[in-house]
Amino acid sequence: MFYREAGDFHTSYPSDNQTFPIRLDRYRYYAVLAVAFGVIPFLINDYWANAILLPFLIYSIAAIGLNILVGYCGQVSLGTGGFMAVGAYACYKFMTGLDIWLPTGPEGEYVRYALPEINIFFSVLLAGVVTAAVTVLFGLPSLRIKGFYLAVATLAAQFFLVWMFNRVAWFYNYSASGQINAPERGFLGIPVTGPATEAWATYLFCLIFTVGAAILARNLTRGTIGRTWMAIRDMDIAAEIIGVNPMRAKLTAFAVSGFLVGVSGALFFAVYLGAVEVGEVFGITKSFLVLFMIIIGGLGSIFGSFAGAAFLVLLPVFLKLLGVDLLGFPTDIVAHMQLIIVGALIVIFLIMEPHGLAQLWRVAKEKLRLWPFPH
Amino acid sequence: MPDQLVFAMEITINGLMAGVLYALVALGFVLIYKASGIFNYAQGVMALFAAMTLVGIMNGQVPFAHLINAILGTKVHHFGWHVPALLAILVTVVVMIGLAWAVQVLVMRHLVNQEPIILFMATIGLAYFLEGLSDLMWGSELKALDVGLPQGINLWIDETTFEMFGYGFFIDNLDIVATIIAALLVTALIAFSQYTKQGRAMRAVADDHQAALSVGISLNFIWVLVWSLAGFVALVAGIMWGTKSGVQFSLSLIALKALPVLMLGGFTSIPGAIVGGLIIGVGEKLFEFLVGPLIGGATENWFAYVLALIFLVFRPQGLFGEKIIERV
């Protein structure tokens, strides 16, 4: 009764083809957008932005990206952390003016050529493009390797990329600490990176990318490309026989996924953290974290990516509130307990609902549709 | 003989020994994967848990002491006794069997017939859980583990090689012991799976679950058995690595070292795990020695993975893995 498709008639192709053809879904979507753009920026403060909203928005982008690869195209990747690092470092290079060193003479002297500094908005987008290219490169073996062998093979990307960003000084502009620090940059005159940012500005900046990522993913997965991805996921040989080009399908999935993961890595570095030490921030735990998000949220679902990101961002905050502030345990015990609880919750979740939070939402919709007469 | 060549020889021998240790961890993966199709990411953390339990029992630590103190305000840390190594190892084996049983009854039995990726994620959850549990039980500080294995440079090899090449090889006694123990363990495992009733049942389950079930083999029992065996292998690996570099969190990262070994050798082959371990042990040490200085060092982190990746492109099922046959 509360959720129904009945009586929702479409009289033209554009109206039938729109992103949310069901009226209630569409209204819900508009309502969420209105709250996100029109209400939250006025209420937000630094704690909410840094502890919850920014990580949620940024992880959502990464989760959508990984979901396209794992949930829609069936290619398991454990290299997300490494690809996020590519996004972060690419963004850093574009922000600070990409430099090229050319040898001038036989004496080993170099001359430095640099691009002008690029606006942070376009730096983030370009970082996504660079990451897409790197991801496709590491995705090439997927044409030969399948299943777990592929999952472990993507770990090669994870370890190699992190090592490279640690060792090659060009990536961190030869800084003594080996870290990268986001300089102060603004978008439309409002600072969004660096120390002097307002909570609402960083929030809105990330929100734009998150909404863009969701719209992109939603529409790609409904169209031809998305259907070829799903065909490859369900059975690659059968898909090949009915005329899906597996190389194209897999590599486009890697590219789109890489683009989104790169954007999220760039935002994670530039807007959220501001300074990054690559081994700590983009290590293998990050890869697992994003994978957990899409498993708990639901494979093959955009809504699930958001739900999973929200769940895993909120859980540690909640546990810390409960353990340290309410019960007064020492922080190291709470940290250990947190590992135990997160591990147990993941297992319990997989046992109770292997299709994730998105499945719970589907069941809830079904119930709302029938209520109050379930039979 | 040129110095470089002698160095390379020493490094190769050390690489072979390191490879045996990698193979030891990889063996645990193969056992579980063969019998139940579960890719057990928690194998490394199981090694950590086993080693920590062993140290804790030997030193007479009170489990969960930190937590108990925080809740009750007491100050208990140690029972005040020291348990001999052999007895402590036996108790740890019992604990690992208990863990195997708990994992099977509480987790894996409910996940039968799920997709492999779900099972894999469950073992990652398990890894988190065990990591937190072992820290909470025994404390997270670095502990020394000494069960009486010989350590330090082997003087006989040092002197013999000095007479032959004018340069004494540094080979750790512990590595030699580890190699012998690993060889014994593998022989024992192969004998177990070939000549005992349970071993044959285990192979039957690995071959075909339904067929095994239909001739009256209890899948539940076999899975508990396999997890116990993996726990035992983890304990052996934990003792070796723990003696070598102390018992601490980084011990669990040996799982990440074992993954490329598995890829190279094939997920389903015990000889593959050993050969893969040796190739990777030697390969990464030699690569670090020959190419490492040119490109900035610390290549051991990724070399094994890249090697395995390139290798897989040419042989997708690994060296000894079962040929992948796909049907529509």
Image (cartoon, coloured by chain):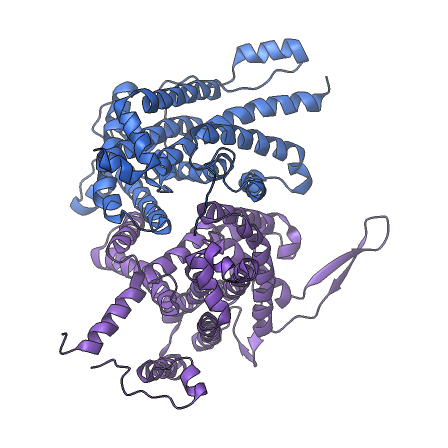
Q: In x, y percent, where is residue B140?
A: 34, 40
Which chain, by letter, is purple? A
Residue B69 sits in which quadrant?
top left
Q: Answer above or below: position of B187 versus A278.
A: above
Q: Answer above or below: position of B83 versus A69.
A: above
Q: In x, y percent, where is residue B70?
A: 21, 46
Residue B100 at least partly seen = no
Q: In x, y percent, where is residue A150?
A: 49, 48
Q: In x, y percent, where is residue A345?
A: 27, 54
Q: Answer above or below: position of A162 versus B149.
A: below
Residue at the image point whose x is 31% and y is 83% from the top: A24
Residue at the image point whose x is 70% and y is 24% from the top: B4
Q: Quadrant of the N terminus of chain B?
A: top right
Judge by depth and name the residue closer to the eye, B81 or A144: A144
Residue A8 sits in which quadrant?
bottom left
Residue B56 sits in which quadrant?
top left
Residue at the image point whose x is 47% and y is 26% from the top: B20
In the image, taking residue A239 as reference, residue A3 lies left or right, namely left
In the image, taking residue B294 as reference, residue A41 lies left or right, namely left
Judge by depth and name the residue closer to the eye, A371 or A162: A371
Judge by depth and name the residue closer to the eye, B274 or A62: B274
Judge by depth and name the residue closer to the eye, A166 or A342: A342
Residue B156 at least partly seen = yes
**Chain B's colour?**
blue
Count the labels in the image.
0
